[in-house]
Amino acid sequence: METLIHGGYGVHLEFAKSAQSTVGVEWELGLVDPITGELRNVSDDILGKLEAPAMSRFK
């Protein structure tokens, strides 16, 4: 069990055990308006346009 401190409160998280060490990789992409340069909240629109086989790769 891992205890993280967030906002002065302890948060307990359960992690799955593994026989060997594992590494997780996460990409964070910023979708930017080409005119203003501001970040845009359009990920739901983009993910909604993906076909079902492509969506099965995302968690």
Image: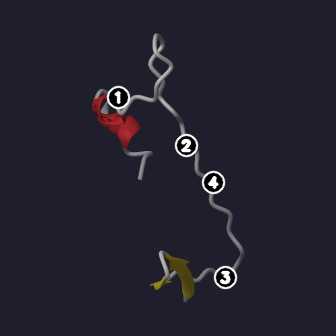
**Residue indicated by mark 1:** 46
Q: Nearer the viewer, mark 1 or mark 3?
A: 1
Residue 31 place in picture, x, y as percent: 47, 28
Q: Out of 36 and 33, give the one closest to the viewer.
A: 36
Q: At label 3, which amino acid type do we have?
A: Ala
Tell me whether the residue at label 2 lies in contact with that at label 1, contact meaning CB atoms closer than 8 angstroms.
no
Q: Nearer the viewer, mark 4 or mark 2?
A: 2
**Residue indicated by mark 2:** 28
Gap in angstroms between the C-alphas marked 1 and 3: 37 Å
Residue at the spot 54% in from the left edge and 80% down from the top edge: 5
**Residue indicated by mark 4:** 25
Residue at the spot 71% in from the left edge and 74% down from the top edge: 21
Q: Out of 52 and 12, give the one closest to the viewer.
A: 12
Q: At label 1, which amino acid type do we have?
A: Ile
Note whether 32 is above or below 34 in the view shown. Answer: below
**Residue indicated by mark 3:** 19
Gap in angstroms between the C-alphas marked 2 and 1: 15 Å
Note whether 16 is above or below 58 in the view shown. Answer: below
